[in-house]
Image (cartoon, grey):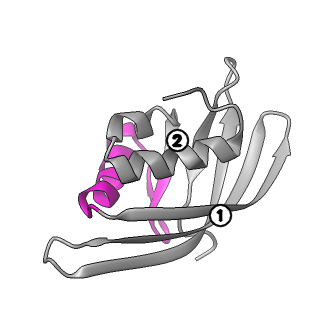
Amino acid sequence: MSEQMTPEEVLNSVVKGINNGDLDSLMKLYEPDACFASEPGQLAKSPESVRQCLSGFIDLKGKLDLKVKRVLQTSDLALVTTEWSYKGTGPDGNPVNIAAKSADVLRQQADGKWKFVIDNPWGTD
């Protein structure tokens, strides 16, 4: 995976990772102490639990579409809001259609790459 030089590129890398089923590339986009909102009001706070959340999306074998709406950046922090939709197939064989607005916090690393500190795909819900 190429280096992520902007927060927008990190979000585009998430789309590629989910759609290609590349969990290892996705995990490289997260700081070691990053958290992931697995559902509104619930946070996964370890690399193992973040990995499990991302696997849940990949296991639906669907397609993620995402559009970055706004990036608010100061120094080494960025708040990125997006609109996204996901269409896949649940374990029961039924179609899964999810859509939401996300609010994510990324931090620029010493090497210039941006990584997730907080991944909240459910936005303000």
The location of residue 107, given as percent across then percent down, is 69, 36
Residue 38 among magenta residues: yes
Left or right of residue 56, residue 30 in this image: right
Left or right of residue 71, residue 111 in this image: left
Q: Which residue bears the numbered disc 1? A: 82
Left or right of residue 80, residue 13 in this image: left
The location of residue 100, given as percent across then percent down, is 55, 74
Which mark is in front, 2 or 1? 1
Callout 2–callout 1 Cβ contact below 8 Å:
no
Residue at screen point 26% across, 64% down: 60
Name the amino acid, label 2: Ala
Q: Which residue bears the numbered disc 2? A: 34
User: Which segment is the magenta one?
Assistant: 36-61
Q: Give the structural element (helix, strand or loop) at label 1.
A: strand
Residue at screen point 51% across, 64% down: 65
Front-most of residues 117 and 14: 14
Left or right of residue 29, residue 86 in this image: left
